[in-house]
Amino acid sequence: MRHYGKVLIPTTFLCIAFSAAAQTPTPSKAPSKQAPSTAKAAPFDPALLQPATLRAKAPDVYEVKFVTTAGDFGIKVTRAWAPNGADRFYNLIRHHFYDGAAFFRVLSGFMAQFGLSPYPEVSRAWDMANIKDDPVVQHNHRGFVTYAKSQLPNSRTTQVFINYGNNENLDGDGFAPFGTVTNGMEVVDKLYGGYGEGAPGGRGPSQDLIGARGRAYLEQTFPKLDTIKSATLVTAAPASK
């Protein structure tokens, strides 16, 4: 059962054989020429296939730069607001989880949601990688960034949304903001939202099909969606002496 959160509407063993008869030394052979490898590197960080290993503690405050097809914007995360959410976001950003992801649910006046991987194998790995809920200590006001979740407790995984309006009604449902857009909110405002609500309630993308088919599904069926080119941690400049 998938838990793609909707904002509430909801060893390999190496065996070496030794031959008892092969005791007489033999001349070494010239190394054989090997054909060049044709295997392609994964288009994503392989660490993303092991969610349980990505548990670094986030700094008290950190910033993230988003480069998107609509322009750039920045998010500042304050760990004290929602420690579990801030730590998860930090690890996802460090390993480029959001690179290539689409803003698949953009609802005017409400929010812009993203956080499903363009790679189905990565989506499968994170499908049940839930984190514990955080208390709500900030309001879901315009520009605040919050995890999507279901009505079940501890159901947050990788999806987040940016509030377009003052959505304090979400506070009581346990949606805990962990950061805020600090620059480029005008870019967030112009993310493509023409498809409206997602399926099955609307004609927009199905979260299940994004998880199963990834980028191919969105490019074929919803080509106007804006996407994230890169989401990276902003390294603070060294203090001047």
Image: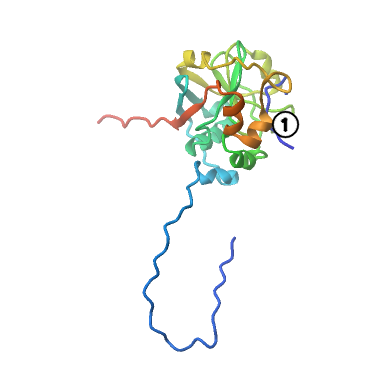
Q: Which residue is mark 1?
A: 153
**Amino acid at the residue labelled 1:** Pro
Residue 156 visible in image: no
**Vertical arrangement, residue 173 with respect to residue 209, above or below:** above
Q: Position of residue 77 (x, y in %)?
A: 50, 26
Residue 186 visible in image: yes
Please tell me whether mark 1 sits on a helix, a strand or a loop.
Answer: loop
Q: Nearer the viewer, residue 68 or 138?
A: 68
The figure's colour scheme reads: rainbow
Identify which residue is drawn at 60% across, 23% down.
222
Q: Residues within 10 Å of mark 1 (few under 14, many from 20)?
A: few
Q: Position of residue 164 (x, y in %)?
A: 57, 13
Quadrant location, the N terminus: top right
**Vertical arrangement, residue 81 with respect to residue 55, above or below:** above
- The picture quadrant where one finds residue 195 is top right
- The picture quadrant where one finds residue 87 is top right
Quadrant location, the C terminus: top left
Q: Nearer the viewer, residue 76 or 51?
A: 51
Left or right placement of residue 50 versus residue 69 in this view = right
Q: Position of residue 208 (x, y in %)?
A: 69, 32
Q: Nearer the viewer, residue 61 or 159?
A: 159
**Vertical arrangement, residue 209 with respect to residue 122, above or below:** above
Q: Total of numbered circles in the picture?
A: 1
Most distant residue in the left direction: 241
Q: Position of residue 78 (x, y in %)?
A: 51, 26
**Vertical arrangement, residue 74 with respect to residue 211, above or below:** above
Left or right placement of residue 89 versus residue 30 in this view = right
Q: Nearer the viewer, residue 50 or 57?
A: 50
Identify which residue is drawn at 57% across, 45% down.
49
